[in-house]
Amino acid sequence: MSITVAGEKSEGQQVTGTTTGLDLYGDDKTIVAVRVNGELRDLSRPLLDGVEGAEIQIEPVGNASPDGLAILRHSAAHVAAQAVQAAHPDAKLGIGPPITDGFYYDFDLATPFTPEDLKDLEKRMTRIVKERQRFVRREVSDDEARAELAQEPYKLELIADKGGATADDGASAEVGAGQLTIYDNLRRDDSVAWKDLCRGPHVPHTGYLPAYALMRSSAAYWRGDQANPQLQRLYGTAWPSRDELKAYQTRLEEAAKRDHRRLGRELDLFSFPDEIGSGLAVFHPKGGVLRKAMEDYSRQRHVDADYEFVYSPHITKGELFEISGHLGFYKDGMFPPMHLDEERDEDGTVRKPGQDYYLKPMNCPMHCLIFRSRGRSYRELPLRLFEFGSVYRYEMSGVVHGLTRVRGMTQDDAHIFCTVDQMADELTSLLQFVLDLLKDYGLDDFYLELSTRDPEKSIGTDEEWERATAALEQAAAASGLDLVLDPGGAAFYAPKISVQARDAIGRTWQLSTIQVDLMLPERFGLEFTGSDGARQRPVMIHRALFGSIERFVGVLTEHYAGVFPPWLSPVQVIGIPVAADYNDYLGEVAAKLRAAGVRVEVDTSDDRMQKKIRTAQQSKVPFMLIAGGEDAEAGAVSFRFRDGRQQNKVPVDEAVAIITDAIRDRVQV
RNA sequence: GCCGCCUUAGCUCAGUGGUAGAGCAACGCACUCGUAAUGCGUAGGUCUGGGGUUCAAAUCCCCAAGGCGGCUCCA
């Protein structure tokens, strides 16, 4: 049979071949590519070129599908690059792949982009889109490609490397396996407006790009390597319609509104005083209540799960981290040492060399020493040592970010010492414990990431790593959650599973980590006596649920947009008298609530009732109890909830029950 | 750490070489009110810090600190 494929309806090309019978002739704004035998192809070449066989599957790819969006965005990247080279003829092309919600394109450019440049470039893009330049695919030999792109040193590098191109090195968008292709942008008169080395596919012509915007620019290393030159990266977004672009921009605004750094200030939770230093937070009273509620519940759950509570100091002699290996592999992440107790003679010669002390970047070595403090029996295992341990890491200045990336943090850290035989069961129940607890904090959409060994930066033998990795894989499988691989992402001493949680607006955060460590027990010479009387080496499992309490506070703040469930709300109830005459009455109601363990305040300021409601609403207090003459006479209060719902003249005892139930059940209201 | 941008009152922001401004918050006074802002007034700033150019710098230049967006790195 014969099918017709629409590049443009007016320019439809006839292609003959056997298909499953799909008619691709459709709206040329919605079909941007087709899939032939599983391979994505744009509409700029005969669809059945190079395709053999009778059962050819052809499937249209709409511009709203994931593939279609990627094609749309990658095509927008080409338009952006054409605009950049029109404005800056000396700009050399890097790469320009699609990314989540958009695209970027890297350029080697004498001067960085300015905000004015972005506006100018958007106008140039609009002109290109209006020209409806066709994207036309052309297969070229290596020599042809080199000749045509002689002015593009980065493209030449990609051509030279094409043999080694892999899916994740960023070169894949330009260079496919084996065959090089160049895409020409042709104007109506077939003159070449622009061209780029590219694997494709692309939309049929630039008129398929109805909605795009340049978002920002920044520097990025060529091929992501700090040793390479920095290029100027232009970030943009592109959507199938203006409405979707608008919705995306609205979504960004909504995300900005729930930024924990902003909410932290607005809700008076925490701050980062300059005088203390970058990445070092202080928690204000309201943030302290929130944090304490988080910690208290965590403690209770750990007691229930047979953890034992330990404490360890914040600084230690360097010797400890030499034993653990941190000074060999993690020194860049540690604050520089304090050199203490050195003594010198009058002439300056060192009489006593002194000691280097370090702030601890991790708690594990301390817990190893607790384990080793006396002889241990197999009867004690699994031994679970828990600590809210404050650690300090010298993060690079450019990476600190609110509470999610700090230099001083408290981990809800525990180390489980167990036998090799216990390891699998322990990991499985541990992962379940972690997920259960996270759910209690309101997160319930997870996937797992398995980070494996980086041979360059690790200690131990292949066999040990394989054993530990296999145990983690088994526990992950038992959880039934999706598992994503992160090759080479492990810490130097152990592979890890990290729990990635999606928040209310779909962003993912790395929270809990579970690591199986066969190295530290060896380095610290940890032993226990088995039932047969022989000494054996325990397995050590590292785990943190919140990751760090700071990050968890930040994540929950954004997840809830500051609208915390009552059990986590800094102020759970605020009493709002209709007039000052009812201050005392509400004071009595508040006393009853306080006696029931509720965090309650009464607003006795001179403001009007409406103003007090507004204030309470802005501070996101879950329960507003309003009382005037009618309520006082009835021995009742009137509720206003955060969402504006009202419930009038509720008897006080009933009101107390409504509030205490919601807190106890950790439900959102 | 690298690149770019930013830093004016507690917060949000005007002010672009010629005497530091507004709104909100704070404080005071009056008002005593039924579900998102009562009115009037007071106070608050070495314009992040240091150096330079200039008759004159919040404004132009240099350095530092802190922040923002990325890169790289990570709980």
Image (tube, helix red, strand yellow):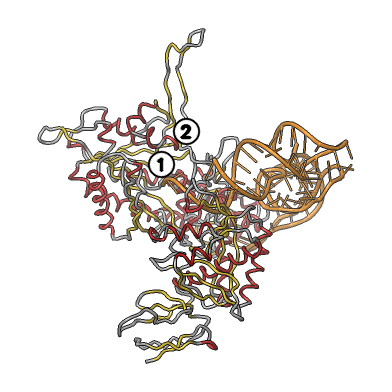
Quarter of the view holding residue A247: bottom right
Q: Count how many numbered circles sit on residues in the image.
A: 2
Horizontal arrangement in the rendering, residue A31 relative to residue A387 (left or right): right
The CA span between labels 2 and 1 is: 17 Å
The answer to whether marks 2 and 1 mark residues whose Cβ atoms lie closer than 8 Å is: no
Please give the name of the residue rendered at 63% of the width and 77% of the height, measured from the top-left corner. A131
Q: Mark 2, mark 1: which one is toward the viewer?
A: 2
Q: Are marks 2 and 1 on the same chain?
A: yes
Three-letter amino acid code at the position of disc 1: Gln
Horizontal arrangement in the rendering, residue A639 relative to residue A488 (left or right): right
| Secondary structure type for disc 1 | strand
Q: Is residue A584 visible?
A: no
Q: What's the chain of the residue with tag 2? A: A
Q: What's the chain of the residue with tag 1? A: A
How many other residues sit within 10 Å of disc 2, few (<14), some (14-19) or many (≥20)? Answer: some
Three-letter amino acid code at the position of disc 2: Phe
Image location (x, y in percent) of residue A122: 64, 66
Front position in the image: A380 or A343: A343
Image location (x, y in percent) of residue A654: 46, 58
Residue A411 image label: 1
Which residue in the rendered view is the most extreme toward the bottom?
A1
What residue would you read off at disc 2? A335
| Secondary structure type for disc 2 | loop
Please give the name of the residue rendered at 53% of the width and 54% of the height, measured from the top-left corner. A562
Horizontal arrangement in the rendering, residue A586 relative to residue B46 (left or right): left
- Quadrant housing the N terminus of chain A: bottom left
Lower position in the chain sequence, tag 2 or tag 1? 2
Residue A223 image label: none
